[in-house]
Image (spheres, rainbow, N blue to C red):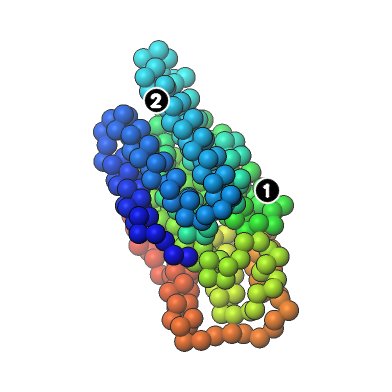
Amino acid sequence: MLFHPSYIMFVISLLFSIILLVSSSSWFIAWLAMEINLLSFIPIIFNKKNKYSSESAMKYFLIQAFSSVFILVVVISMNYSLSIMIILLMSALSLKLGAAPFHQWMPAIIEGLSWPVAYIFLIFQKINPMMLIMFLTKYFPQFMNMIIIFSAIVGSVGGLTQSSIRKIMVFSSIAHISWIFTAILINNYLWMCYFIIYSFMLFCLVSLFYKMEVFSLNQMLLKKKSLMSIIMMMSLMSLGGLPPFTGFLPKFMITMELVSLENILLMLPLLTGTFFSLFFYMRVSLNNMFTKSSYLLMNNEMLKKSNLLITMNVVGLLIIPLMIMFV
């Protein structure tokens, strides 16, 4: 895919909006940063010029504009009833983020996105709402518990019936939101570590999907087996949190924290959801590994690129002591 030079400007503007929100000290500046983020992402969606990208851009704009207006009204009305306003504000931010039960718009939108844009949608577009939610969780942790349980259930069960890989990645993202929100309730360092590791794991997968040009499980059956198939299986198992891959680390640390806090209410849906998620990750892996083409294709360029992806998936065991030391 060739990007128009103007897209560099929109990507820079999108990154600037994230930096602006992180460094802001007022709700108005934070709201302004989210609007800059929205207006920067809409042109990026149009990089894939077809009716589906136009439809996705329109849906995304309407959802984000509605939640932005809602946030602005809530912030202006803060003096009336603080507790109710904070709950409404967290609901609006959850809608922006795509957390369950405010997730219905996400699967429809991602179908019109290319893989690079889908990665931006699943990672960079979540940073701003999560940063704001981080400051609100201390007021109503009970509301966060509800979002976590809904996201864990919807994210794991929703992916079981999907044949579109992009939709599977959306429901996977919703499931990971439940873990990130749980980490936010524990401490700020833990959720940042989880989000960074999740970003790297998803980057591995999206790079492979983009390279192989696959968007559905049926397409994967027709692809020739290569070293990328093995790396994809490793990436999916890492994303599912299977030891000894990197994705196991943050989930293990969060689970240990929940055990120490004796928080069974969150631990059960999170772990149950992870088992369901591993099932549909295995579906993708098996569709990719067991194809009609039984031979293995490799070349020097592929081997060089694969070394980095393999390292990103198995490096987890090397950084366990470092992460435990800081938590």
Measured in 3D between alpha carbons, the distance from the residue under mark 2 to the one under mark 1, in whole angstroms, is: 34 Å
The residue drawn where x is 67% and y is 67% is: 219
Residue 274: where, in percent of width, then height?
A: 61, 53
**Residue 47 shows which numbered tag?**
none
Q: Nearer the viewer, residue 135 or 187?
A: 135
Residue 43: where, in percent of width, then height?
A: 43, 48
170 displayed left or right of 207: right
Q: How many discs mark residues in the rendered view?
A: 2
The residue drawn where x is 69% and y is 73% is: 222
**Mark 2 / mark 1, whichever is N-terminal:** 2
Judging by the rendered image, the residue that carries numbered circle 2 is: 72
Label 2 environment density (alpha carbons within 10 Å; few <14, some 14–19, many ≥20): some
Judging by the rendered image, the residue that carries numbered circle 1 is: 157
The amino acid beneath tag 2 is Leu
* Corner quadrant of residue 226: bottom right
Q: Which callout, 2 or 1, points to the residue nearer the camera? A: 2
Furthest residue in direction top, as rendered:
80
* Residue 76 in sight: yes
**Depicted 319 relative to depicted 128: above or below:** below
The amino acid beneath tag 1 is Val
Q: Secondary structure at mark 2?
A: helix
Residue 22: where, in percent of width, then height?
A: 30, 42
Q: Secondary structure at mark 1?
A: helix
Q: Are marks 2 and 1 in contact (CB under 8 Å)?
A: no
Label 1 environment density (alpha carbons within 10 Å; few <14, some 14–19, many ≥20): many
The residue drawn where x is 38% and y is 45% is: 40
Residue 80: where, in percent of width, then height?
A: 40, 12
